[in-house]
Image (cartoon, coloured by chain):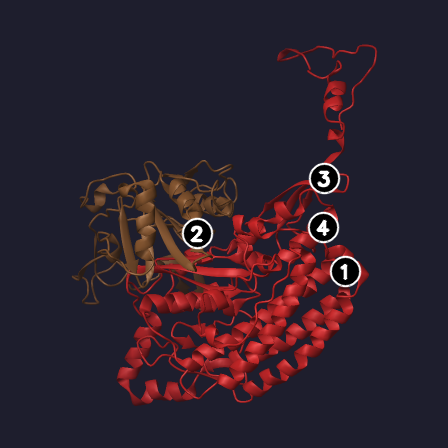
Chain colours: A brown, B red
Amino acid sequence: MSDEHGTGTGEDVQGGVQPVGMQRKGLFGAADSGDTSGFGGLVQATPLGAEVVSTAEPLGGYFDEILAALRELLGEDVVRAVVVDRGELTVYIAPDRTEDVCRVMRDDESLRFELCNSVSGVDYPDRRNRLHVVYHLTSMTYRRRVRLETAVGLDNPVVHSVTSVYPTADWQERETWDMFGVVFEGHPHLTRILMPDDWEGHPQRKDYPLGGIAVEYKGAHIPPPDERRSYK
Amino acid sequence: MTTTEHGSDAYAAERDTTEGRVYTVTGGDWDELVASVDPVSEERLIVNLGPQHPSTHGVLRLVCELEGETVRSVRPIVGYLHTGIEKNMEYRTWVQGTTFVTRADYLAPIFNETAYCLAVEKLLGIEVPGRADVIRVIMMELNRISSHLVALATTGMELGALSMMIYGFRDREYILDIFEAVCGLRMNMAYVRPGGVAQDLPPGGIEKIREFTEYMPKGLADYEGLLTGNAIWQERTQGVGYLDVSGCLALGVTGPVLRSAGLPWDLRKTMPYCGYDEYDFEVPTHNGADAWARYLVRLDEIRESLKIIRQGLDRLEPGPVMVEDKKIAWPAQLALGGDGMGNSLNHIRHIMSQSMEALIHHFKLVTEGFRVPAGQVYAAVEAPRGELGIHAVSDGGTRPFRIHMREPSFVNLQAIPALAEGGLLADVIAGGASLDPVMGGCDR
C-alpha cells in the first residue's frame, strides 16, 4: 500500500510509527474538470503524514512518572515514542507489547489504571503502518488518564489482545476488528459485532467508500456525500 | 428431543442409496449413555429474546440457554441499529458532526453534543463563554432527568408496573417541552455547538425551567409512592442483577450501575468539565449492587440534578453564548420563530443587502467550515448511563478525520451475562433494564 505514496522516512519496523511523506494538491475535492478555482497548483503536506516527533522529556506532571515506571518494569525499549499534546499523554508501544504494558499499567501500585475506557482504531492511509489501535486508560486511584497507541501494517495486522487484563476490551476489540480489520491475538472469539457476520471489508478504513445514492430533487441530482464537491 | 427407537433391531439399519451404502450413527445405548452423563440436556432450550421484543429495551437480541426457568447462558447480540454515524461524520464539517452525534444515544442528545463539542473545543484550543457553560449544564441536567425518567418508565413497564410508565413518560414530556421552547426541537436538537450553544434561552425560558424544578419533586414523590414500598417491585428488583465493584471495573461499567455498587465515581466530581466543580451536589451511591439499588440511585440523581439546575439558573449572567471568533461561531445567528428555529431575519438582511464581505464570510463558513489543528484528544462527560467519551482525531482539515464514541450503553451491555446467568429468565429482563441500555448509542 505504502509504496505508491513515496519512500519511508524511517526504518520500517512492525509497530513503528514512522509515517510516509505525503502531499496533496489543490483545495477542492473535485478533480474531474479543469481548475477554475485558482487553487489547483497549491501543494500541501498532509499533517498526519508527517513524522511523529516525540515530545522532549521531561514532560512534566505525572507523565514522567508513568514513563519511568513503564521503562523500569518493562525495559527502555517498550516506549517507542511519547507525545504530549493539549495536555494529554500518548505513549506509542509495539503491537506485541500491548498486553504486557496494560498488565503493568493496571497492577503496578504507582500506576493503577483500573479502568480501560475505550479501545478503538484509526486508519492513517498515508502511513506505512496505517492501522492504529488506541487505548484510553483511566486511573481512578490517581485520577489520571493516558492514551496508548500502537500501529500495524496491512500485511500483518496483528495486535496482542488485552482482554485477559481488561475484560471490557472484549467487545471493543471486536468492534476494532469489525471496523478496521485489526486481528487481536488471544481474543476469545474475535467475530464481527456491529456489521453482519458475512460482511466483506472493514467499513471504517479510509479506502472503504461511504456509499449512498444520488437523490433527485426538482430535476437536480445531488450526489451522495462522498462524491460531492468539497474542500480538502 | 432425540428418541431412540427400540424396535425389532436395537441397532440402526443400513440403507442403500444412490450414493452407496449409508450407515446411520444413532441407535445402541448411546442415548442412555449421554443421558446418564447430563440428565437434563434434553430439557435445555435455546430461546431468542429479540431483536424485536417489547421488553428488550430496543433492538437488542439475547440468546438465552434455559434449563427450565433458569438461565444457563446469555449471549447478547448487538448491531441491529448500526447506522455508521462515526463513518458519516468523516464526510461532514465539524459543525455538522453535532447533528450526527446527537442521534446516537437518542435519550441523551445533549450529552452526545456536549462531549463532542468539548473534544472539538479542546482540539481548537478555545474556551466557551461562561453563560454557554451554565446553559450546557442546565440542559444536561434536564436531559439527565428525562433520560432517568425513561429508565424508570421502561423498567416499570417491563416489570408490570404500567402506571410508572405513564407517569415517567408524562413528566418527561414536560422536559421535552422545555427543550422545544429552547431549541425548537424535542429530541436530536444539535443545540450545543463547537464554541458554545446555538442560541440563548428564549424569553420565559428560565421561568419555565424554574416551574419544572418546583413540579418535579411532586412527581418523585408519586414514583416513590408507587414503587418504593411496593412489595412486588421490591421482590422483582432486590437481589436481582447483582454486579459488584470489581465486576463493574473489569467490565468497564460506569454510571449509576457502578455507583449502585458503592463506588462514588462520577466524572462531574472526579474530572470536572463545564464548571461542574463550582456546583454543590452529592454523588448518590448505594451498596446493594442490584436492580433495586440502581432504581434508588437514579431517583437520587434526579434530586441532585434538580439542585444543580436551580444553582445554574441563579448563576446565569447576561453575556454571549458563543465564542467571539466569527470564523468558528456557526451558525452566524439563528432566531426562534413560531415554526421553530430558523434564520434570523436581521442576519439575512445584513448578509443580503448590507455587507458583501459578510455574505462571503457566511458562505465560506457554511460550505467550507472551519479548520481544526491536527492532533487527537479524548473528552468525556458523565452521561446518564456512564462515561461518554469522544476520541477525536483531526488532520488539520475542515472535517473530522476520525471520531470514536465510547458509548456507555455499548460497554455496559457486556455485563448482561454476568448479571443474568444462573438466575431466572424473568430476572434477565429486570437486570437488563437496570443497565438502561439505549441501542441507538450502543450500535451508533
Q: CA distance from mark 4 to mark 3?
A: 13 Å
- Residue B268 — which label? none
Which one is nearer the viewer's eye here, A121 or B98? A121
Q: Looking at the picture, do discs 4 and 1 lie on one chain?
A: yes
Q: Amino acid at mark 3?
A: Leu
Cβ–Cβ below 8 Å for labels 4 and 1? no
Q: Is residue B31 above or below residue A229?
A: above
Query: Quick one: label 3, few (<14), some, or many (20+) residues within 10 Å?
Result: many
A144 vs B220, left or right, is left
Q: Looking at the picture, do discs 2 and 4 lie on one chain?
A: no
Q: CA distance from mark 3 to mark 1?
A: 24 Å
- Residue B233 — which label? 1
Query: Quick one: label 2, few (<14), some, or many (20+) residues within 10 Å?
Result: many
- Residue B66 — which label? 3
Report which residue position mark 4 lands on: B427
Q: Would you say residue B149 is visible in this rendering?
A: no
Which one is nearer the viewer's eye here, B55 or B111? B111
